[in-house]
Amino acid sequence: NETDHVLSLQQAYNHSRAVMLEGHQLQLQPQHRAPFHRPAANMPHHLEARVVGSGWQPSGKLPIDAVGEYSFQMVQTTPMVAFENIRYEVRSVKATTFVIFRHESTRRAAVRVVNQSAENLSLRQRGADAPMVDLRPNDDLPFAFYEPTLPKRLEVVCAQERNIVSKTADIERGIEGHAAWAPLGIGVRSQVFYAVRRIGPTLVVTF
């Protein structure tokens, strides 16, 4: 744990998060490491992380079966809604898998969302159980997907058309096809388009 949070880790299950298996959670102090054994070996290799503290919600399912670097969104719902992007690295050394959690650099974020329109937008990962992130005109924010196992699609709502929810294509898989501006289709009063491009390690989604 290379963050400055105390993290609670457990194996992610397919059932409701309200069901917790006692004795199978690990609390990891900042700048510490500890062994962790998955209690259900027949389940997918996914972890669930939560910041220990008031109002922090469990993360989505975090895959740890493939070597690489990934990012995900942590959500705090009280005393006010707040978001923090965490990066985790999966390494394999002989028979051991290492999972290293770090704060994501805002300068080298995996995803950045930019609002160059005149509309107040709200967005989140489509299909994820996460609050909306508000994106005002001229806002430029680092972003991470809450549920890494789901497609990298955004659900977007415009303040003028609150009853119409639009969605982007998978921004990670379809980046080559998003070189041009694509319409969001958020109602007749909104003419918001979006484009996706890669700048270094960052996918930039511009509205």
Image (cartoon, rainbow, N blue to C red):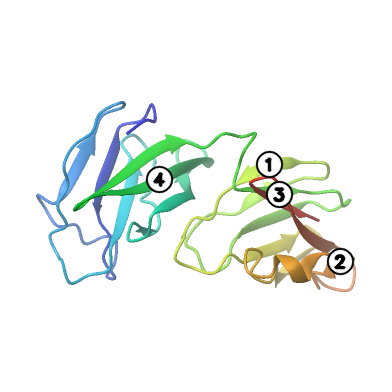
First of labels 1, 2 by sequence position: 1
Q: Quadrant of residue 197?
A: bottom right
Q: Indicate the position of residue 62 as horizontal and vertical percent values.
A: 37, 56
In percent of the image, x 90 and y 66: which residue is there?
Answer: 191
Q: Quadrant of residue 50?
A: top left
First of labels 4, 3 by sequence position: 4
Task: Determine the CA span between mark 1 and mark 2.
Answer: 21 Å
At mark 1, the secondary structure is strand
Q: Which residue is mark 3?
A: 113
Left or right of residue 32, residue 175 in this image: right
Residue contact at pointers 3 and 1, CB within 8 angstroms: yes
First of labels 3, 1 by sequence position: 3
Task: Determine the CA span between mark 2 and mark 4.
Answer: 32 Å
Query: From the viewer's perspective, is the residue at label 4 or at label 3 nearer?
Result: 4
Q: Which mark identifies residue 141?
A: 1
Mark 4 nearby-residue class (10 Å; few <14, some 14–19, many ≥20):
some
